[in-house]
């Protein structure tokens, strides 16, 4: 402490003394300079006064060429003052008098001035110059005088400076040095981690706050903040230790394996997942070499060799999917993530091993599903094209057969009429087979859309029975419905899609009639099932099914040995039936005995709602007058069928166009009352025509009836969304087509 204090005092004394000396020198120099300036100015004024008084006598003496008078005037000028030399020069510049101050030589530093001397009397030419007066001035005497005075005052001034410096030094020692020494002593003994520790410093001369007090205050604040910071650091270190423990627990609970490796690929840390994946318990301290093989390219390489061969930029991540074969565990598909670290002397690599076997299997399953969906789409597209290709000629067969059935001449010949009706039935049967195949394709591709709702079972079953009653009469089979009259009140309504449920019942009833015996029966019973369900049982007295046949009942295109029975069928009706029932959240079961008969039971959930009551049908509009119908169809046979069909309406004029371009040209030329439109045309599709009608505002309000062999749901939906009023599929049912045409033409007549 004494050493520090003495050093500080010495430095302060030297600094104060040097500063005082500097002040003394600067102030003294300024005073000497000021005094010299004053004395010099006084001497110069005296010289000017002497010259002004002596100029005229000197000029008069020079005019009279009185050398004695000139010397007397010159000696008077050089006797004292600043003038040390006087020269009187004639008009031609030759010296007349040259007199220096007696008793001294000419000083080195002099100032020379010259005055013009003029004649005392004026001439006609004006003032006549007769010579010059040159004087030399020197201020050495003044400088010597100032030097003598300075040397005389110097000791006293130095004593003043030393006294002032000593006083300042003592004051600084009292006010600064002693207090700073006390501050240092207290700082040496203060507790750094104690926020309440303080240093105490006495005040200044009057006890007021000064810089030392502010310094002590700042030191106290720094000590307080530092102690708090140390406490916060201790808390942070504790939290860090706890966080490291938590991270260690988290890393140990991760599903992915984590390995921390040094630059020599020695394992410094491994979590539990890494030990499990690699089949080793104690991985820390082991070398990565030999623990596992990776399968990237043949042959397999060691995991350590694979990692060391990766050219990974600093602080970057490298990822690769590969097959990992641990030495002590089963092989699996892995995702390896390697990270390089900087600034960590003990850890150079972080290797994360993820088991992605489930993901790989899921991707494989997804690819398989996509291939299956692509296959289904291809199959559906193929079936759609085949359906179109089959329905187009079938439309001609069925259409012409229906036209012949309405020929009065053929109606008089029962045998020929029966043969034509046989052609019609065979055509519709073939259309039904095509429809069943397409329906199965829709079900397999998941494109069946249901609209479930409450269904009145007795009414719907009665419609289904009416649908197959003609076949039952032909086969001499009796159809009977057994259901309570108050079924809807006592049991309620079934929850199902009415159209799909009717399709299910028609299929079951059709099979029950088809494979029955002459004089047999088909009974339909509606009963209460398990709580919340209703059962529809269809029982026949037909041939029955064996155990082997029941096992293969729901196989597609398997007719169970009925191929030689002479009964038409495809073997997919029951497959479609079971799928539709299950899609409606129902179940279907079967029981049968050979030679006795078969019973199918359809179980459906009950609905909590009631079906909407149908609105009363509006009265038919009066018959329409002459109408013009435009039919865009490229197939001449289909055009001929439509001509034969509309020949039953003599008031209709039919115009046929074979391309989209011709059809649009006809529409631009004249607006028909009805447009019949095929989907597939040589230069476009029916959708192109519908879009042109909408975009070009052709024939606003023109009803469009689609007539196509394309029965796919997407095509039907697209046409209806594009503005078509209805969609009829080929082969054409004459009654259906005439009903649609009559209805649309009546609407146009009413609108007109």
Image: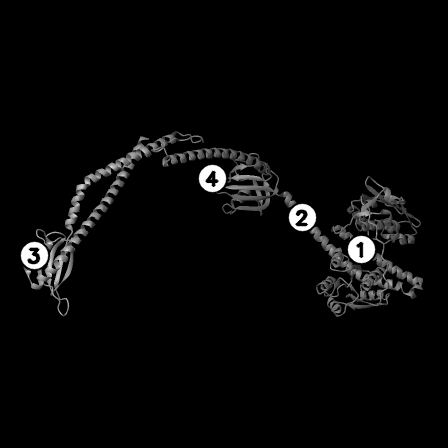
Q: Nearer the viewer, residue 234 or 523?
A: 234
Q: Residues within 10 Å of mark 4 (few under 14, many from 20)?
A: few
- The answer to which of 224 and 303 lies nearer the viewer is 224
The secondary element bearing badge 4 is classed as loop
| Contact? badges 1 and 4 (CB < 8 Å) | no
Q: Which residue is labeled 4 in the image?
A: 345
Mark 3 sits on what residue? 72
Query: Which mark sits nearer the N-terminus, 3 or 4?
Result: 3
Task: Indicate whether 159 appears above or below 524.
Answer: above
Residue 513: image x %, image y %? 88, 50
Compared to 621, does 334 lie above or below? above
- Badge nearest the viewer, 3 or 4: 3
Q: CA distance from mark 1 to mark 2?
A: 31 Å
Distance from Cα at disc 3 to Cα at disc 4: 107 Å
Q: Residue 390, located in which quarter of the rendered image?
A: bottom right
Quadrant (top left, top right, bottom left, bottom right) of the N terminus:
top left
Residue 442 lies, in percent from the top left, at: 76, 52
Residue mark closest to the camera, 2 vs 3: 3
Residue highlighted by disc 1: 435
Who comes first in sequence, dot 3 or dot 1? 3
Label 4 vs 2, first from the N-terminus: 4
Sequence-wise, which precedes: disc 1 or disc 2? 2
Quadrant of the image occupied by residue 53:
bottom left
Q: CA distance from mark 1 to mark 4?
A: 76 Å
Mark 2 secondary-structure assignment: helix
Question: Label 4, label 2: how many angstroms apart (C-alpha)?
Answer: 45 Å
Crowd class of label 3 (few under 14; some 14 to 19; many from 20; radius 10 Å):
few
Q: Residues within 10 Å of mark 1 (few under 14, many from 20)?
A: some
| For residue 296, side relative to residue 540 (left or right) | left
Q: In the rendered image, which residue does mark 2 sit on? A: 366
Observer-nearest of 54 and 1: 54
């Amino acid at each position: 402490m004494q050493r520090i204090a003495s050093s500080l005092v010495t430095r302060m004394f030297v600094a104060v003394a040097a500063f005082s000396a500097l002040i003394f020198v600067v102030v003294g120099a300024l005073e000497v300079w000021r005094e010299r300036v004053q004395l010099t100015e006084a001497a110069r004024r005296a010289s000017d006064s002497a010259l002004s008084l002596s100029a005229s006598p000197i000029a008069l003496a020079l005019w009279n060429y009185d050398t004695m008078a000139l010397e007397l005037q010159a000696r008077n000028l050089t006797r004292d003052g600043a003038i040390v030399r006087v020269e009187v020069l004639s008009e031609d510049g030759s010296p007349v008098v040259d007199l220096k101050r007696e008793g001294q030589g000419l000083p080195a530093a002099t100032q020379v001035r010259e005055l013009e001397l003029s004649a005392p009397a004026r001439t006609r030419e004006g003032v006549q110059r007769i010579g010059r007066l040159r004087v030399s001035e020197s201020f050495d005497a003044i400088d010597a005088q100032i030097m003598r005075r300075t040397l005389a005052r110097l000791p006293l001034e130095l004593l003043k400076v030393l006294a002032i410096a000593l006083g300042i030094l003592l004051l600084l020692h009292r006010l600064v040095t002693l207090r700073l020494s006390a501050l240092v002593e207290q700082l040496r003994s203060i507790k750094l981690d104690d926020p309440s520790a303080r240093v105490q410093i006495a005040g200044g001369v009057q006890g007021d706050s000064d810089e030392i007090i502010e310094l002590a205050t700042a030191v106290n604040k720094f000590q307080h903040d530092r102690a708090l910071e140390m406490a916060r650091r201790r808390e942070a270190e504790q939290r860090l230790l706890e966080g490291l423990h938590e991270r260690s627990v988290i890393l140990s609970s991760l599903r992915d394996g984590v390995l921390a490796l040094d630059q020599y690929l020695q394992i410094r840390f491994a979590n539990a997942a890494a030990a499990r994946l690699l089949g080793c318990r104690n991985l820390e301290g082991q070398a990565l070499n030999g623990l596992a093989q990776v399968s990237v390219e043949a042959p397999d390489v060691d995991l350590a060799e694979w990692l060391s061969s990766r050219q990974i930029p600093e602080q970057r991540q490298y990822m690769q999917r590969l097959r990992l074969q641990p030495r002590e565990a089963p092989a699996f598909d892995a995702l390896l993530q390697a990270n390089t670290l900087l600034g960590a002397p003990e850890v150079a690599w972080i290797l994360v091993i993820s088991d992605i076997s489930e993901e790989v299997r899921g991707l494989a399953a997804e690819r398989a599903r996509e291939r299956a969906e692509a296959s289904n789409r291809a199959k559906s597209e193929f079936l759609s094209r085949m359906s179109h290709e089959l329905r187009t000629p079938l439309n001609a067969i069925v259409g012409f057969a229906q036209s012949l059935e309405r020929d009065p001449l053929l109606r008089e010949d029962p045998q020929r009429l029966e043969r034509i009706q046989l052609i019609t039935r065979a055509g519709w049967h073939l259309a039904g087979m095509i429809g069943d195949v397409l329906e199965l394709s829709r079900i397999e591709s998941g494109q069946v859309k249901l609209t479930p709702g409450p269904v009145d079972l007795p009414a719907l079953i009665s419609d289904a029975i009416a649908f197959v009653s003609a076949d039952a009469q032909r086969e001499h089979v009796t159809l009977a419905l057994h259901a309570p009259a108050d079924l809807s009140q006592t049991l309620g309504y079934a929850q199902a899609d009415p159209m799909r449920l009717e399709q299910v019942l028609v299929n079951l009833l059709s099979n029950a009639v088809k494979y029955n015996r002459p004089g047999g029966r088909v009974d339909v019973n509606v009963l209460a099932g398990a709580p919340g369900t209703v059962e529809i049982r269809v029982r026949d007295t037909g041939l029955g099914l064996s155990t082997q046949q029941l096992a293969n009942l729901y196989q597609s295109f398997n007719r169970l040995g009925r191929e030689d029975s002479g009964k038409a069928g495809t073997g997919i009706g029951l497959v479609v039936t079971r799928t539709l029932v299950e899609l409606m959240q129902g179940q279907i079961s079967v029981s049968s005995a050979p030679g006795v008969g078969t019973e199918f039971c359809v179980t459906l959930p009950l609905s909590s709602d009631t079906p909407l009551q149908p609105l009363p049908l509006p009265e038919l509009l009066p018959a329409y007058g002459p109408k013009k119908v435009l039919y865009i169809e490229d197939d001449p046979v289909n055009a001929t069928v439509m001509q034969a069909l509309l020949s039953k309406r003599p008031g209709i004029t039919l115009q046929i166009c074979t391309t989209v371009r011709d059809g649009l040209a006809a529409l631009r030329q004249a607006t028909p009352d009805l447009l019949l439109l095929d989907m597939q045309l040589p230069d476009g599709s029916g959708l192109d025509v519908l879009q042109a009608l909408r975009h070009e505002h052709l024939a606003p309000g023109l009803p469009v009836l689609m007539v196509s062999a394309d029965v796919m749901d997407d095509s039907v939906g697209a046409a209806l969304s594009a503005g078509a009023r209805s969609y009829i599929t080929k082969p054409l049912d004459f009654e259906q087509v005439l009903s649609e045409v009559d209805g649309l033409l009546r609407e146009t007549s009413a609108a007109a």
